[in-house]
Amino acid sequence: MTFYDWTIIDDAFRAGRMNERNVYSFDKNLINGFVVTLIGGVLIASVEVLYFSKLLRNKPFGIALLIKTIFYFGNIFFFTSLAVLLELSFRLERSLLQPEIIEAFIQYLSTPRAWSLWMFWGFSVMLALFILQVSEKLGQGVLLHFLAGKYHRPKEVERIFMFLDLRSSTTYAEKLGHVKYSELIQDCFRDLTDAVAKHQAQIYQYVGDEAVLLWKVKQGLKDQNCINCFSTYNQQIVRNKGKYLERYGMIPAFKAGLDMGRVTVAEVGEIKKELAYHGDVLNTASRITGRCNDLGAQILISERLKVELESNPGNNRFENIGEMELKGKKLPVNVFKVLLEETTST
């Protein structure tokens, strides 16, 4: 094992504490490394997925980074130490808790190689976690696109957009005050996270009390993800209605408008850089959302999206509202109301 200072083993061999035929065993080293790596990897991944993804969601960036670094580094120290102890046990032909094994392990901890190993892992873990956290804050895949320069020059792509807007936002803002209202928006968009992940959406941007979601066409149409994301989010709000009633005296309700089509995406800005989408699709989705209250609808979609959705399996039904004049549009748009599949929260 490359991270171990084998002068300790050499000393043990010269002192007659080790059998020459056991100086090195490829099979034992391979099994040792595989088992320790497998157990450590499963443990760390399980904690990351089952606990950190939710427990640290509300923590500041720096605190989340520090907690994860300590956890990862602690596990790396534990499992590499376990690997060293097992290797010593194999080579010295002693059980793990024998004094000779413990003594050799303590010697190992005091070697320059051990300290350089921990410094290397500490730096590597913090750097990797920092990059992952930054990537998460920028949005799914955005950092990679920046690094690769994929959209350094404008490109045309096809996307589905959803404008998700809080109903009665002005009333809530006046009732709660701007600080409490901001906390409400934070809670609402935190609860949106699981629905976004489940239905393969990306969060394009937040604009006040509005979230703009997008899908690649294949992912958005599959199982009617772009519609069911809204249903899943509603269920999440219902599950957390006690929290909203206690903190804000109300249960938030959202409306949404969707459209699909070709848009242009490009990197914009110098001091603050982001990926920006431009095109008629965004304007249509935004204007449709604004008509939800007038029509008593939770979701309104364009005809072109409705046609594509009907070719994919799903239990949602659609009601034709008819052609509508939308601000900024020369021609009227045929709009459909989504009759959401009845679901029950768990």
Image (spheres, helix red, strand yellow):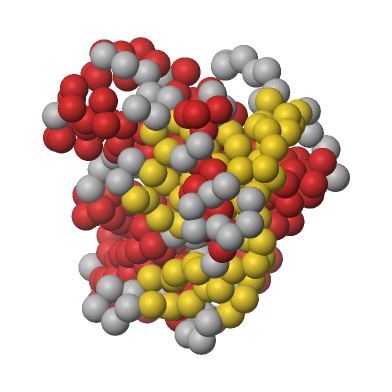
Q: Is residue 71 visible?
A: yes
Residue located 26% across and 25% down the image: 171
- The answer to whether residue 293 is above or below residue 222 is above
Q: Is residue 120 visible?
A: no
Between 195 and 106, the one nearer to me in the picture = 195
Q: Quadrant of residue 15?
A: bottom left
The picture places residue 207, in percent across and down from the top left corner, at: 34, 50
Q: Note whether 37 is above or below 306 in the view shown.
A: below
Position of 265 with respect to 322 (left or right) is left
From the top left corner, tell me how far across and down residue 144 is, in percent.
49, 73
Which sits in the foreground, 298 or 271? 298
The x, y position of residue 181, in whole percent, is 22, 32
Q: Nearer the viewer, residue 152 or 97?
A: 152
Q: Nearer the viewer, residue 260 or 249?
A: 260
Which quarter of the image is occupied by the C terminus? top right
Q: Residue furthest right?
A: 311
Residue under the point 25% across and 19% down: 248
Query: What residue is drawn where x is 64% and y is 51%?
Result: 332
Query: What residue do we see at 38% from left, 71% from top?
Result: 274
Q: In the rendering, at what x and y percent does residue 315 appear? A: 78, 28
> Quadrant of residue 310 in the image?
top right
